[in-house]
Amino acid sequence: MADIYFENALSIFRGYDIVEEQLKCLEDAVAKRVTSAEAAKQLTAYPQKSSTPLELNQRLGGLWTLLNDTAVHLPSTQECIISILSEIKQLPMSEVPRGEGEEYFDFDEGFYWKELTGWENDWGDNYNYWAAQFLIEKSTGEEREKRRQQWISACQYTARLSATNDPALSSYGKSLEDCTSTISEALENETGDQGPENVEAAAILFIYAGRELYRRCVEGNTKGMLEWKSELWKGEKGFSSARWRFWLERWTVLTQQEKLSEERRRAAQSALSAMQNIDRTSGQ
């Protein structure tokens, strides 16, 4: 699948300021032919050669789109891409070019690699797009399934970013809190025998960022939990240990719901197992 994706990458990213060398570099990094550190240097070389602020802004946007879109289209690349982003943050300050656009763009005084300047906006817009495609816009058949998988992948990427505990990666774009309405919709509402459409998306948050959710619940964070009706949850708003236990009970119910598809029951079981493992290793 990755081979086909990169074969078509030039057409996929037509219109973005991305060069073939960057596409080849990312393909090599995903295939482990180059290290993440080497990939970071190669991928950033093209933006760093920009002759004006306008050009730098366009090339940075192209790079962030390449990384974020690939992470959604190919979830198997997410670990590699997050590693590359971490390496990019280690790159030294660069001189910002003068000329066209300098009165409009802010490049963090040359620390645009350390601050991942513009990455947060790109991922935020990207996440909102995938959410709208699945949760708002109507679709059927194969197109509906395609959008569902992309939405699950977007949630997985957000969960993985959150689990890095890196302030920039975990909160600059879309944070774990931005995904919590998915949990609320899937676990805190009556959805009939077929179960909620968001089962897999919600489950992926517990699988990859369960400890972050657990920490928020134990700390009792009253802010950040986005609720979607929450017909079944009768407790207080926000994160809490009681809410964590309620979610565990709801996953247990979903694993036993016979009319739920096998795929959704497997997702529910994986989320339940992740929560039970966190409870066990946290001494709860």
Image (cartoon, helix red, strand yellow):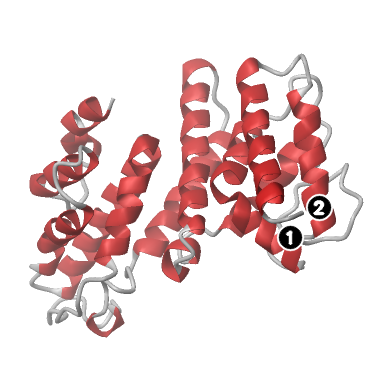
Q: Position of residue 107 (x, y in %)?
A: 27, 77
Determine which residue is flagged by label 1: 217
Say if mark 1 contacts mark 2, CB within 8 Å: yes
Q: Position of residue 248 (x, y in %)?
A: 77, 41
Taking the spot 8% from the left edge, 72% from the top edge, the residue there is 51
Taking the spot 67% from the left edge, 30% from the top edge, the residue there is 268
**51 vs 29: above or below:** below
Placement of the N terminus among the 4 image quadrants: top left
162, 121: nearer the viewer: 162
Across the whole image, how many numbered discs are drawn on residues? 2
**Please, what is the three-letter code of the amino acid marked with disc 2?**
Arg
**Please, what is the three-letter code of the amino acid marked with disc 1?**
Cys
For label 2, the SS is helix
- Per the rendering, the mark at residue 159 is none
Placement of the C terminus among the 4 image quadrants: bottom right
Determine which residue is flagged by label 2: 243
Taking the spot 31% from the left edge, 59% from the top edge, the residue there is 85
**130 vs 169: above or below:** above
